[in-house]
Image (cartoon, helix red, strand yellow):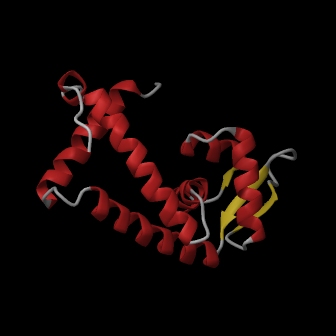
């Protein structure tokens, strides 16, 4: 393997970017093997945690563009993982609800992500993993829109 210039190797931004590329590949490969996509996981997780939501709410909570939410929800409806019905309180809005099949798929995808975390963070102890997660959340929170 080629050496990395030291001035890059000591920059957290460069290290985070390199690791993000690797993490994205691992997650994508794992979800593909499970017949799923990352957007599916985000939407199923939000519905499981917060309950039924409009597509607009899902987009905001999951940080997914509106058109991508529509496409992902369409796929999840086709697979029987969510139901989409007109919102009785708002005529032009749809309400998306998690199904039992969606809960099972979310659990399968949780298993995939757990394995990805283990593969990605293999050299770190459990304590170091918790510290890394805490630090990343702290830095990310500084850059989140209010």
Q: Residue at x 56, y 73 (%)?
A: 105
The image shows residue 48 at horizontal and vertical percentages of 53, 63
Position above or below: 104 against 113: below
Which of the 4 image quadrants contains residue 77? bottom right
**Is residue 43 left or right of 95 when viewed as pictured?**
left
The image shows residue 19 at horizontal and vertical percentages of 33, 43
The extreme top residue here reads 7
**Is residue 130 left or right of 98 when viewed as pictured?**
left
Q: Quadrant of the N terminus?
A: top left
Position above or below: 44 against 15: below
**Is residue 88 left or right of 13 when viewed as pictured?**
right
Position above or below: 112 against 23: below
**Is residue 122 left or right of 24 when viewed as pictured?**
left
Q: Residue at x 15, y 60 (%)?
A: 126
Position above or below: 23 against 138: below
The extreme front residue here reads 2
The image shows residue 99 at horizontal and vertical percentages of 65, 73
Q: State the residue in front, 57 or 80.
A: 80
The image shows residue 71 at horizontal and vertical percentages of 75, 52
């Amino acid at each position: 393997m080629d050496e990395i210039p030291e001035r890059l190797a000591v920059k957290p931004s460069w290290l985070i970017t390199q690791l993000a590329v690797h993490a994205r590949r691992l997650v994508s490969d794992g979800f593909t093997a499970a017949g799923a996509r990352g957007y599916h996981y985000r939407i199923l997780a939000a519905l499981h945690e917060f309950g039924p939501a409009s597509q607009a709410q899902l987009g905001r909570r999951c940080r997914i563009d509106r058109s991508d939410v529509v496409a992902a929800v369409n796929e999840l409806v086709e697979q029987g993982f969510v139901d989409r019905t007109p919102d009785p309180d708002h005529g032009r809005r749809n309400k998306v609800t998690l199904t039992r099949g969606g809960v099972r798929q979310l659990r399968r995808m949780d298993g995939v992500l757990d394995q990805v975390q283990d593969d990605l963070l293999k050299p770190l102890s459990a304590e170091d993993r918790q510290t890394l997660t805490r630090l990343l959340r702290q830095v990310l929170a500084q850059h989140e829109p209010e």
